[in-house]
């Protein structure tokens, strides 16, 4: 661990009021698949053989879908949300120091509390610490490239890292990924499970990325681009980017029609 | 103009990519970073129920196993109770059994395994009994939005025949895409499954 790096502090200026949404046991709002990439998106070649061709079978939320795993602080270590320190061996990782912060909300606008958010990324040169990544940019001895956080009671999360670099990949001969951070989010029910990617405001590779442009809806695409958030930056230390994540909303159960005896 | 409803829109999904292991199971990417790691072992020595190994592959449209796929499973305990506050059924809760695990496929063979217990039958909100099953979520490079499916058990023929979800599947032949086959190997119970992403045997995937 590196003793020089200052401790990571909560970058919020004003904490929003805590919200503890009532725990509904209704199903989730119907997923609007028109804002998601289709399974079969030929411009992203890997999807061609890995996309189901039959219709999905629609299930109204049963107990199997409205429930999901519950995580707690016991599952995490103290440096899990600090990618500048969680793999540092003899110094800080190379790259632009950044804070990424935001809220996990549901479609009703309520914060999703105590939910697990996991993130992973390439280093500043665009290289992943992964045995299958052979890009010629070097691995950074002080950078692992992954972390995780539990949202607080308002759905808020934050972590510190270095800005990932773009990297080339085999789709077309000259395909490059825009700088991005992968996110995995749970929510309260397994039907809210989501993996996505966060991009950075102003990146010129965004409009030409074969993966990003699988998204058919421009507004949905724009919502994956995190703006620079100067107000949350740490002066003389780190810039900040803001990334809110929206999971499916949950129907309330105003009128119960429960079978007696169970 | 009527009042606006002002719902937010769900964040769009993006593929987990080829390096999903870094974030979710870093040991498979080739390094050790977290003090505590999630795994494909759901049981502890105290877990109630019959110990089972789930073992299977995910095949692409050519029948080739995916060797960079990640599966998560979510299941009830042996009493049919999910470890979640929204499950208000009568089965006994076991705090130590989270009921969730994740596994990456082997980089050579594509084999995915979980060590868990066979879940009990589930009583849904309407009071219907559902056959024992395990919920599965699949992500990988080339999968643009996580795929939801289920695994049922081949030795539960009667319960499967009455299951409300299996009965939603119009073609009986497609129901069998969700049934894992029981066998015994060296005194251990193994349930084997194959998930076909495409083709004549395409697995039934759900819009949950
Ligand atoms: Fe990536």
Image (cartoon, rainbow, N blue to C red):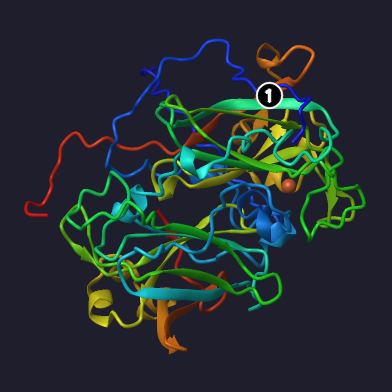
Left or right of B31: which side holds A10? left
Left or right of A59: which side holds A10? right
According to the picture, the residue beneath numbered tag 1 turns out to be: A241
For residue A206, say whether it is visible. yes
Q: Give me the chain letter of mark 1.
A: A
Left or right of B1: which side holds A178? right
Give the total of numbered labels: 1
Q: Nearer the viewer, residue A217 or A178?
A: A178
Give neighbour class at mark 1: few <14, some 14-19, many 20+ (Cα, 10 Å).
Answer: many
Which residue is the extreme one toward the right? A136
Label 1 beta carbon less than 8 Å to ligand 1? no
Q: Residue at x 28, y 66 (%)?
A: B78
Q: Residue at x 69, y 52 (%)?
A: B32
Left or right of B48: which side holds A193? right
Q: Is residue A57 above or below residue A109?
A: below
For residue B141, say whether it is visible. no
Q: Position of residue A252 (x, y in %)?
A: 27, 35
Q: For the residue labelled by badge 1, is the local secondary structure a helix, a strand or a loop?
A: strand
Q: Is residue A184 above or below residue B82?
A: above
Q: Nearer the viewer, residue A231 or A9?
A: A9
Q: Position of residue A67 (x, y in %)?
A: 34, 49
Q: Residue at x 64, y 75 (%)?
A: B65
- Which image quadrant: the N terminus of chain B? top left
Q: Position of residue A241 (x, y in %)?
A: 68, 24
Q: Residue at x 75, y 48 (%)?
A: A210
Residue A8: name its quadrant.
top right
Q: Position of residue A176 (x, y in %)?
A: 84, 46
Q: Is residue A143 above or below residue B204?
A: above
Residue B187: name its quadrant.
bottom left
């Amino acid at each position: 661990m590196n003793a020089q790096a200052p401790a990571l502090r909560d970058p919020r200026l004003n904490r929003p009021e805590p919200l503890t949404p009532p725990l509904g046991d209704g199903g989730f709002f119907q997923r609007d698949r028109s804002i998601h990439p289709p399974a079969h998106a030929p411009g992203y070649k890997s999807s061609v053989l890995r996309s189901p061709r039959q219709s999905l079978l629609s299930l109204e939320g049963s107990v199997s879908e409205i429930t999901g795993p519950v995580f707690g602080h016991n599952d995490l270590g103290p440096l899990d949300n600090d990618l500048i320190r969680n793999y540092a061996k003899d110094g800080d990782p190379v790259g632009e120091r950044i804070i990424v912060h935001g809220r996990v909300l549901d479609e009703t606008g309520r914060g999703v509390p105590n939910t697990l958010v996991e993130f992973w990324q390439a280093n500043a040169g665009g290289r992943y610490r992964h045995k299958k990544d052979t890009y010629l940019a070097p691995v950074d001895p002080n950078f692992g490239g992954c972390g995780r956080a539990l949202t607080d009671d308002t759905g808020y999360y934050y972590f510190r890292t270095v800005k990932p670099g773009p990297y080339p990949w085999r789709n077309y001969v000259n395909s490059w990924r825009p700088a991005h951070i992968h996110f995995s989010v749970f929510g309260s029910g397994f039907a809210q499970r989501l993996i996505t990617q966060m991009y950075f405001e102003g990146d010129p590779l965004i409009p030409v990325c074969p993966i990003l442009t699988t998204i058919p809806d421009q507004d949905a695409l724009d919502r994956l681009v995190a703006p620079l958030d100067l107000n949350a930056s740490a002066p003389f230390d780190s810039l900040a980017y803001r990334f809110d994540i929206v999971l499916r909303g949950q129907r309330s159960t105003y009128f119960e029609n429960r079978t007696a005896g169970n | 103009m009527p009042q606006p409803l002002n719902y937010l829109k769900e964040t769009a999904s993006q593929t987990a990519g080829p390096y999903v292991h870094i974030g979710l199971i870093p040991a498979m990417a080739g390094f050790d970073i977290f003090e505590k790691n999630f795994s494909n072992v759901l049981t502890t020595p105290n877990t109630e129920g019959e110990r089972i190994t789930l073992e299977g592959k995910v095949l692409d449209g050519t029948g080739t196993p995916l060797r960079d796929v990640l599966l998560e499973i979510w299941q009830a305990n042996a009493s049919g109770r999910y470890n979640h506050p929204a499950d208000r059924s009568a089965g006994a809760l076991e705090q130590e059994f989270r009921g969730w695990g994740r596994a990456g496929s082997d980089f050579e063979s594509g084999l995915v395994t979980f060590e868990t217990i066979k879940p009990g039958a589930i009583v849904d909100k309407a009071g219907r009994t559902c056959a024992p099953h395990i919920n599965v979520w699949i992500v990988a490079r080339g999968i643009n939005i996580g795929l939801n499916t289920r695994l049922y058990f081949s030795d539960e023929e009667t319960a499967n025949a009455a299951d409300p979800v299996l009965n939603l599947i119009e073609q009986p032949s497609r129901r069998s895409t969700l049934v894992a086959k029981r066998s015994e190997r060296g005194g251990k119970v193994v349930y084997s499954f194959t998930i076909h992403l495409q083709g004549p045997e395409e697995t039934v995937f759900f819009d949950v």
